[in-house]
Image (cartoon, rainbow, N blue to C red):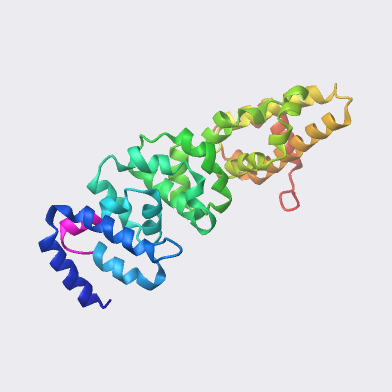
Amino acid sequence: VKPERVTAIINDLNVTIKNKSKDFFHELFTNLRKNEPSKLLVKESNINYWKDILESKHEIIIEGIIEEISATPFNFFNFYKHFPQVLELAISVDSKFIVERLSDWLGEPFYFLDNNQKMFWELLVETLDRYNGIYIDKILYRTIALIASFEPDDRKLRILNQNNIFKKYIFEQSSWFFKTDSNSQFDNYHKLVSDESHYIECCFNYLDWDIKCIETLNSALDSLEYSMAYRSNPASSHNGKFYQRKCKRIICNNKEKILSIPNIDLSNYNRISKIINECDCSNNE
């Protein structure tokens, strides 16, 4: 449809549909989806069509299409991928959109499969930047698995760290990681060698290090050292050495951040200090 034709249709709709704009777009979306195998309404081939509608000068039209877009995660994420402004529009139409709908959707990794994973981080950052009342723990519990697709920049890291995203995952949801006696490591072996352990390592690489990070890791390594002296089972010793290697990698990868922590005296943290002195980050596996 030519742009001028779309504009003419929008102008006609503005006169005829009045307060039934959402109903019109609901029916339009339903009919379009019937003939679309992928069920995705926005595609490269029709972006200009939707652009003309979303940039209409008629408030009734905008409100109607945004109400329909923001009614379901399927529609919202499909449109957001091509038109990030729908987040701002959804908030302007419904001030509770983030807390009542979007925050729940952000906790479901199913919506961010394949090439939508980067969109999760973009949306999380924008959401945290606008609203600080969302239930972060629920989001982190499942969608932290998308961290492999995270592309950091200064703004994203600043906002995520201001909201303690990485620290919450490490210290609250993954407290098992710091239990280093032999029984705990046996119980948590499946986690230690799984993706969960990798997510923790990624979070350590992105967070703003402070003394709590140093104290917690040093204490875990101290406990491990004591425990290792009494381990006769080869598998148990293997678990401990696996953990030591992981911690060394975490510490060496973040050596500069650790050394930049204000007022820190590493001589008080013998395990961390020893690893830092041994670091060869260029060859660290």
Residue 213 position by quadrant: top right
The number of callouts visible is 0
| Residue 64 highlighted magenta (yes or no) | yes
Which residue sits at x=37%, y=61%?
33
Q: Residue furthest left?
A: 15
Residue 208 screen position, x and y as percent: 53, 40
Residue shown at the point (38%, 36%) measured from the top left: 134
The residue closer to the viewer here, 61 or 22, is 22
- Magenta span: predominant SS is helix
The one of 160 and 258 positioned closer to us in this rendering: 160
Residue 113 locus on image (x, y percent): 52, 53
Q: Is residue 192 above or below residue 88?
A: above
- 248, above or below 264, in the image: below
Q: Looking at the image, which is closer to me, 178 or 54?
A: 54
Residue 181 rendering spot, x and y as whole percentages = 75, 23
Q: Is residue 111 magenta?
A: no
Residue 100, picture quadrant = top left
Q: Which residues are magenta?
A: 55-65
The front one of 268 and 114 is: 114
Can you give x and y, in whole percent of width and height, for residue 157 in the image? Answer: 48, 47
Which quarter of the image is occupied by the N terminus?
bottom left
Q: Is residue 276 visible?
A: no
Does residue 173 lie above or below 107 as drawn?
above
Q: Is residue 192 left or right of residue 241?
A: left
Q: Do we see residue 15 in this rendering?
A: yes
Identify the residue at horizontal 30%, vertical 43% (top origin).
97
Q: Residue at x 51, y 46 (%)?
A: 109
